[in-house]
Amino acid sequence: MDEPHLYLQIVEAVRQEILSGKVKAGDRLPPVREMSRRWNCTAGTVQRAYQELARQGVVHTRAGQGTTVTGELMPERETPLRRAQLQHQAETFLLEGLSAGFSPHEIEQAMRLALDRWRARPVESQEPEPGCLRFNGSHDPAVALIAAQAGEIYPGLTFEITYTGSLGGLMALAQGKADLVGCHLWDEESDTYNVPFVRKLLPGKPTVLVTLAQRRVGLLTPARNPARLSGLTDLVRPGLRFVNRNPGSGTRVWLDAQLKKLGIQGNQIEGYHLEKATHYEVAQEIAEGRADTGLGIEAAALSFGLGFTLLTTETYELVIPAEKWQQPAVRALVDWLNTPPAKTAITSLGGYDTTATGKTTWLS
């Protein structure tokens, strides 16, 4: 490995010595000059490694006293060393990806896709840990954005995400398996979003709806839309391969209602029964040539460099039970959504209108 990256190997070697017990809390690490000879590198490379270890809380350096391993390590799940090790693994993956010719954007996109697929897997709900908000419901990149910034929104906050679709989220909330839900369910009769479904699935339960954003939804296609798709009636073209969302997702609910209006049956669309749990998975199918189009949000199209044909704009809201509303972390989240930095961050994902972001509606 080139010397600019050699410091990472030194960092990992020191960590492994601490984990193995060879180096214990309170022990001094070798002087910089000695380590540079051992690793056949410059003193600057060793200093960079020690600085990284200090930044991660694994060691501390004092003038005239050298570099010392921090005091008694905390339990494994809380120790800075454990988190530092995970960070190192992430950096190793990043370096491998860059060395293989991938761009930082491509690597970040791959990690987001992997995380979203993991979050969409079936899991047994557990009691939340202190400082954790359990999110369940519809896939949205802005939700992952909240999770990434949770500790800045409220100190100590973690945001646990499970993607089950809007209907699945509301059912999880009704069963006490979630603290808040992401929902964008369109009601054909009233031509409104979410409220009729919340009243039906959570009858008599005081609830707050908080607008996350308005989202642009349409047909995702390969770049420049080679098939010249303009609407849902094009989906019945012979040979056109469609990729669908899972039943219970707000996108699927809207699609099925529109197809019914148009008199189109699912079996008339090739790929109608090919179902994916997230917008990113739909986009990936198209980007990798396994499908020609699918219904999804514009942010997913932008992430994968796809074409996008707008069909509708929908309201995506967070559904929060009244008993959760007074939790400091929940109030901090809603306050954050009303700030310019939050709206800027969501807008930067592409395909979002944040004019109403942070707006609250009470249902009783």
Image (cartoon, rainbow, N blue to C red):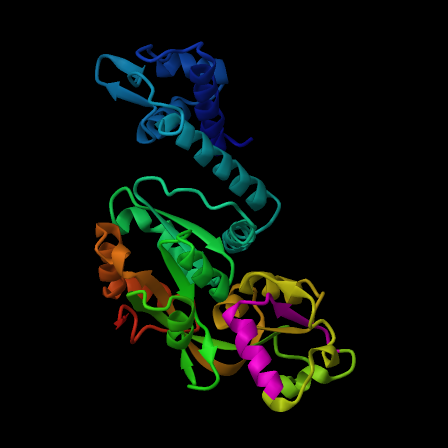
Residue 168 coordinates in the image, percent (x, y): 50, 61
Q: Quadrant of residue 184?
A: bottom left
Residue 39 coordinates in the image, percent (x, y): 49, 18
Residue 183 coordinates in the image, percent (x, y): 42, 67
Residue 247 coordinates in the image, percent (x, y): 59, 67
User: Which residue occupies 40% across, 74% down?
Assistant: 194
Q: Count the marks.
A: 0
Q: Is residue 241 magenta?
A: yes
User: Which residue occupies 50% across, 52% down?
Assistant: 108
For the view shown, which residue lies furthest in the bottom direction? Answer: 262
Depicted 215 relative to depicted 17: above or below = below
User: Which residue occupies 46% across, 73% down?
Assistant: 185
Which quadrant, please, contains the C terminus? Answer: bottom left
Depicted 100 relative to depicted 67: above or below = below
Q: Quadrant of residue 274?
A: bottom right
Q: Is residue 322 left or right of residue 160?
A: left
Q: Nearer the viewer, residue 2 or 104?
A: 104
Depicted 217 relative to depicted 86: above or below = below
For the view shown, which residue lies furthest in the front direction? Answer: 204
Q: Nearer the viewer, residue 85 or 48?
A: 85
Which quadrant, please, contains the N terminus? Answer: top right
Q: Which residues are magenta?
A: 240-260
User: Which residue occupies 40% across, 82% down?
Assistant: 192
Q: Is residue 216 magenta?
A: no
| One can see residue 195 in this view | yes
Q: Nearer the viewer, residue 49 or 167?
A: 167
| One can see residue 296 in this view | no
Q: Is residue 235 left or right of residue 49?
A: right
Q: Quadrant of residue 156?
A: top left
Q: Is residue 140 left or right of residue 278?
A: left
